[in-house]
Image: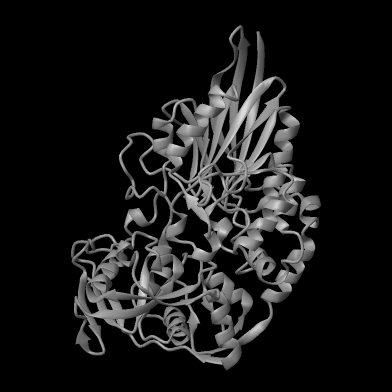
Amino acid sequence: MEKMDLVILETSDVHGSVFPINYGSNQSSDVGLGKIASLIKKERVKNPHVLLIDNGDLIQGTPLTYHYAKIQCNRPNPMIVLANELKYDAAVFGNHEFNYGKGILASSVNESNFPWLSANIVSKETGEPYFGKPYIVKKVEDIKVGILGLTTQYIPNWEQPQHIEGLRFEDAALTAKKWVKILKDDEKVDIVVVSYHGGFERDLETGEPTETLTGENQGYQICMEVEGIDVLLTGHQHRQIAGNRINDVIVVQPGKDGIALGKVTLQLEKDEAGWKCVQKSSELLSVTAVEEDISLLEKVKMYEDVTQEWLDQPIGKIEGDMVFRDPMEVRTKDNALIEFINRVQMEVAGVDISNSALFDSISLGFPENVTMRAVVSNYIYPNTLKVIRITGQDMKDALEQSASYFEQYDGKEIKVNPSFITPKPQHYNYDMWEGIDYLIDISKSSGERIVKLEYKGKPVEPEKEYDVVMNNYRAGGGGNYFMYKNKQVIKDIPTDISEIIANYILERKVVKATVNQNWKVIY
């Protein structure tokens, strides 16, 4: 009886991470494609039959990719240069692939020596897969492996409309049913691999929902409802998942920023009926203590050098203190950095109410001498701004949603609600406001925590309308802020917020740190 091991390697949510550094501090870090490349090469030496797939969110996420997209885009995309060098078999579109616009995305696809797959991103005009290929069939000796690409259908809730013009995002689970059947019946594949830029909406063991079932993540549903899948590669949630089966589908998810390589091993045997899978497993190969592949990094060193030069350009000074060491302190009382970002947003938008977030817990604030590095390491997303018109009730509901970031106070310490940490850290979904005065009482139950809410010294009226500036992700309802969905857009400001902040400091040269104490958390 013939036997064979087939290895499928997955990267996902690399987010432009190439060099093993933290751009905020320039200290070394166990991240990036440089280290991943060493693992890939090792696996290819050990295993004669390897397929390599990227599962989305490849081309956006670091100062390297931002600088490329905004300043160097007349050259080949550095992420595609590396992916070509590593000989990927296929890639899938993530939601962040669209962030830099259709031009950057189209050139990235054109420069790739491998196909980009997405069965459920279709042309509004024809209903056909917009980017050409819903799937590919790879022959590994005489085994036929079908690889189907799917992308979270929730993208229109976050992305700039002009970046996805002419596209329709269809239900990933329904699309999988259609195309897996074609792979089995028409293409006669032996193995079906689905690469889905989305995650799991339910607990992998119990099937209980772990989030609001919006359709953003349908991994569990796909495993349970679509017959014939052998392997489901996932991403989007930045989780590290391996060794799990759902309805006999082996699943894997390798975190983010290239901290690990996903590996699926299929043991195959051939009998009179053909090849079948007799054993399957998944694991994560960590890059910790792995040496980066210097020869690969050399291919994009010139991009990195000009990015580093740009990051260290001084743009102005802070008078006062915008540095912080405790992210929980930032989220429990008004502070200079968030107040500054909100004031910049209010000025450029011409309104007097704004909200913003501290995106992760490793931000450090702005030092006295501000560089581009400080700006992009504190404002890490390529968001733009929108002014939307909301009611006072919407404002109260949004503040209650933010206030749910905290567990109910137990008399000992302030704790973050686990739903904002697992399955994926979502510190970026806790907003802080300027232009209104409010108190959050975390001794009260969720939904009843906003005990003061005033605008210009008077209570905010539930029926009255207010114009508020916020990032485009939030304005579309991202982060379960459903009260914002389909609100009237008063103004759309298409410049990246990090660029707006940098320009604000460049023009003024000196910025004063101020804190007006308009809000705080009490208990």
State the image coordinates of residue 432 (x, y, percent, origin top left). Answer: 36, 74
Q: Which residue: 58% across, 9% down?
A: 273
The residue closer to the viewer here, 71 or 494, is 494
Image-based side of 350 in relation to 235, left or right: left
Judging from the image, the colouring scheme is one colour
Indicate the quadrant containing the N terminus: top left, top right, bottom left or bottom right. top right
Answer yes or no: is residue 286 visible: no
Indicate the quadrant containing the C terminus: top left, top right, bottom left or bottom right. bottom left
Residue 333 image-quadrant placement: bottom left
The residue closer to the viewer here, 146 or 418, is 146
Q: Which residue: 61% across, 88% down?
A: 506
The tally of labels here is 0
Tell me: residue 308, above or below residue 118.
below
Q: Which residue: 47% across, 73% down?
A: 325
Q: Which residue: 39% across, 85% down?
A: 351
Image-based side of 247 in relation to 455, left or right: right
The residue closer to the viewer here, 476 or 31, is 476
Answer yes or no: is residue 328 visible: yes
State the image coordinates of residue 512 (x, y, percent, origin top left). Answer: 49, 91
State the image coordinates of residue 409 (x, y, percent, origin top left). Answer: 23, 63
Tell me: residue 110, above or below residue 428.
above
Tell me: residue 509, above or below residue 200.
below
State the image coordinates of residue 162 (x, y, percent, origin top left). Answer: 53, 65
